[in-house]
Image (cartoon, rainbow, N blue to C red):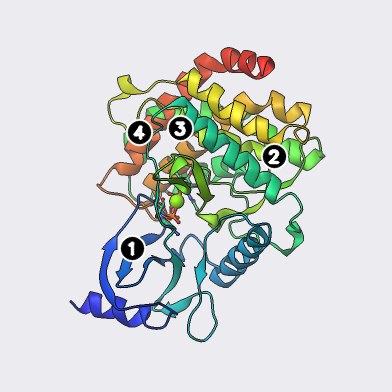
Amino acid sequence: MNKNNKTFNLLDRFLIEGKILSIKPFGEGHINLTFLVETDKKKYILQRINDYVFSDVEGLMNNIYSVTAHLHKKGVETLPIVLTKDGKTYIYDEEPYRVYEYIDNTTTYQSIPNARIFENIGAAFGAFQNQLADYDATTLVEVIPDFHNTPKRFENLEKAISADVKHRARSCVEEIKFFFERKNTLSKVVDGLNDGSIPLRVTHNDTKINNILMDATTGEARAVIDLDTIMPGSLLYDFGDAVRFGANTAAEDERDLTKIGFDLELFKAYAKGFCGALKGSMTEKEKELLPYSVYLLTIEVAIRFLTDYLMGDVYFRIDYEDHNLIRAKSQIQFVKEIEKNMEKMSQIVKEL
Ligand code: ADP
Ligand code: GN1
Ligand code: MG
């Protein structure tokens, strides 16, 4: 009850229309705490921003405010920020909170129902890149430095193994070995960005399919959401991460490793949508690295899950004790499936 009173009080500081009827936990995000708020007039999304992950909340909200304004000017449907009564984009009530209008008649998928839908999602994330192509990247705060710097992620894993604060390293010897065997395969994209052979763009960086709202009636992609990680990056991040999640025949945290497989048809569908939207602006090198990006983003998140497990689950929200270990094992299995399919993926990209 106290908790609820607190939520009512903090909502009262935002420009909310109507009388609050209910506040319920919502969605499947791993980072923020999300609630659906219903009033007698409208629906809203209330989020407690994870300020362990986003230490510069002011910078984060400035990014989202200006990116959504940029998209809005172009007539693109985007996250509608609800301001506070004193004109701010968030409040502090022990922790930071923000409110968005709920984008009505939409749904998110946790898995891909058919190839056509994944092609649509690819086209929408590709279009999102285009919409941000003229956005001035110098105004963006890099909210999580080195977010997709995979070699740095590997270094963080090494540090977590050395510190071993929870004495968990002994239970993941196989997983650690798997990553060390692939240590020299992790730098192609950061190297390309550094030497200029891969263009730096404004990218979303977290293109899981539950970060795009789909129209509940037509099944078409409506709005790209979860804009927290918009930063300068490579287009390959937005390709690889979406395929990592969407083309897996199982969930990201599937325990039964025999269920995990790579769906080449879904890969093809996403590539068709994404490359179709970006034709003309994608370089040959980017095209060539599309299959590699799927490998890279998957092994990267596997490394991040295991690092978090070793550090005592400080970053990703978990539902049970060894959730991050299960996620790491599951993603490692998916890396193995990806490795088996690299040639076929390259062939598909060539034929597109
Ligand atoms: P996290 O950073 O924790 O992943 P998200 O911003 O992705 O949080 O939000 C979690 C979920 O809440 C999304 O996957 C989506 O289902 C839902 N959601 C978020 N914002 C909106 C919105 N404005 N309208 C409708 N649904 C939303
Ligand atoms: C997190 O916030 P969410 O659940 O959409 C994470 C991504 C990971 C993903 C793995 C800010 O995404 O980088 O790929 O979990 N977001 C952040 O499921 O770290
Ligand atoms: Mg999300």
Q: Quadrant of the C terminus?
A: top right
In terms of image quadrants, where is residue 350?
Answer: top right
According to the picture, the residue beneath numbered tag 2 turns out to be 190
According to the picture, the residue beneath numbered tag 3 turns out to be 246
Q: CA distance from mark 1 to mark 3?
A: 25 Å
Q: Amino acid at mark 2?
A: Val
Residue under the image location 57 percent in, 35 percent down: 122
Query: Disc 4 or disc 3, which is closer to the eye?
Result: 3
According to the picture, the residue beneath numbered tag 1 turns out to be 35
Q: CA distance from mark 4 to mark 3?
A: 9 Å
Query: Disc 1 or disc 2, which is closer to the eye?
Result: 1
Q: Is residue 22 visible in this depiction of the protein?
A: yes
The percent coordinates of residue 322 (x first, y second) are 28, 42
Residue under the image location 49 percent in, 24 percent down: 266
Q: Amino acid at mark 1?
A: Phe
According to the picture, the residue beneath numbered tag 4 turns out to be 251
Query: Disc 4 or disc 1, which is closer to the eye?
Result: 1
Q: CA distance from mark 4 to mark 1?
A: 23 Å
**In this view, which residue lies farthest toward the left?**
1
- The reply to whether dot 4 and dot 1 touch (C-beta < 8 Å) is no
Name which of mark 4 and mark 3 comes first in the sequence.
Answer: 3
Left or right: where 196 falls relative to 63: right
Name which of mark 2 and mark 3 comes first in the sequence.
Answer: 2
